[in-house]
């Protein structure tokens, strides 16, 4: 079965750029999307079809996908961006990555 | 306003059954693939099952095949998950999600608040 691999944790200083990666075999040939989940809340879609932002998502969130790696980039990271982030793609079924805890310190 | 409201969770013994419901409003329910996604306590997201707009196609994660059944009633704007032969490892918050992608590839643009299923004796 298809697997998506994310680093368990990423740390970033306020105002800096955070990059969260998601790796999978030939992931660049598929669409990847990203969800943000804060404690006790439901996930929120922040990037879809690799690079698109849903309405209401700040411009500081961006995405890319090439080769075997999709990347979620948060520019000018703010304290309120601290959350768990999950990538998701499709390969015969819907697949989620294991999640990355973003700490803003 | 799009809303998804899950219900039906609770405490059930191993081997027991439970039926989850998801009431949808604020959009044309029959136009979208719908999914169930679960999250075990302290763990990540796991896709469970999805169903095509007209109910003609259904897909499941291997771990629930033969035990869980997804269904929908477009007249009632409702999604269901019948869970049988429940195991301790099925303990999780179960979310229903609307699939933005029209091909059943995920990309969930709306999620419910979740309903907790606890399987324990």
Image (cartoon, coloured by chain):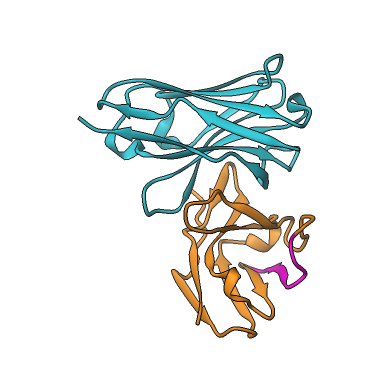
Chain colours: A orange, B cyan
Q: In the figure, is residue B101 to the left or right of B58? A: right
Q: Position of residue B99 (x, y in %)?
A: 68, 40
Q: In the figure, is residue B51 to the left or right of B19? A: right
Q: In the figure, is residue B102 to the left or right of A22? A: right
The residue at 65%/84% (across/down) is A15
Query: Is residue A40 positioned above or below A7 on the image?
Result: above
Q: In the figure, is residue A16 to the left or right of B114? A: right
* Magenta region: A57-67
Query: Is residue B61 positioned above or below A41 on the image?
Result: above
The residue at 62%/61% (across/down) is A26
Q: Within the image, what quadrant is residue B91 found in?
A: top left
Q: Position of residue A13 (x, y in %)?
A: 56, 85
Query: Is residue B82 positioned above or below A72 on the image?
Result: above
B91 drawn magenta: no
- Foreground pick, B58 / A68: B58
The residue at 47%/52% (across/down) is A40
Q: How many labels were placed on the picture?
A: 0
Q: Position of residue A42 (x, y in %)?
A: 55, 48
Farthest left residue in view: B121
Q: Position of residue B82 (x, y in %)?
A: 46, 21
- Foreground pick, A91 / B43: B43
- Foreground pick, A101 / A1: A101
């Amino acid at each position: 079965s298809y697997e998506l691999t994310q680093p368990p944790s990423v740390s970033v200083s306020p105002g800096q750029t955070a990059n969260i990666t998601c790796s999978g075999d030939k992931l660049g040939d598929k669409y990847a999307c990203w969800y943000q989940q804060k404690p006790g809340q439901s996930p929120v879609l922040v990037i879809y079809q690799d690079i698109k932002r849903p309405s209401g998502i700040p411009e500081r969130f961006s995405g890319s996908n090439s080769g075997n790696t999709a990347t979620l980039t948060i520019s000018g990271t703010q304290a309120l961006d601290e959350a768990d982030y999950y990538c998701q793609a499709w390969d015969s079924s819907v697949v989620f990555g294991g999640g990355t805890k973003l700490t803003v310190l | 306003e799009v809303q998804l409201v899950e219900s039906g969770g609770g405490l059930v013994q191993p081997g027991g059954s439970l039926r989850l419901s998801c009431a949808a409003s604020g959009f044309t329910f029959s136009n979208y693939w719908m999914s169930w996604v679960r999250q075990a306590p302290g763990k990540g997201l796991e896709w469970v099952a999805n169903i095509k707009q007209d109910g003609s196609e259904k897909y499941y994660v291997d771990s629930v095949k033969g035990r869980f059944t997804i269904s929908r009633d477009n007249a009632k704007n409702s999604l269901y998950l019948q869970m049988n032969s429940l195991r301790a490892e099925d303990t999780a918050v179960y979310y229903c999600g609307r699939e933005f992608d029209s091909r059943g590839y995920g990309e969930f643009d709306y999620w419910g608040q979740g309903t907790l299923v606890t399987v324990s004796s």
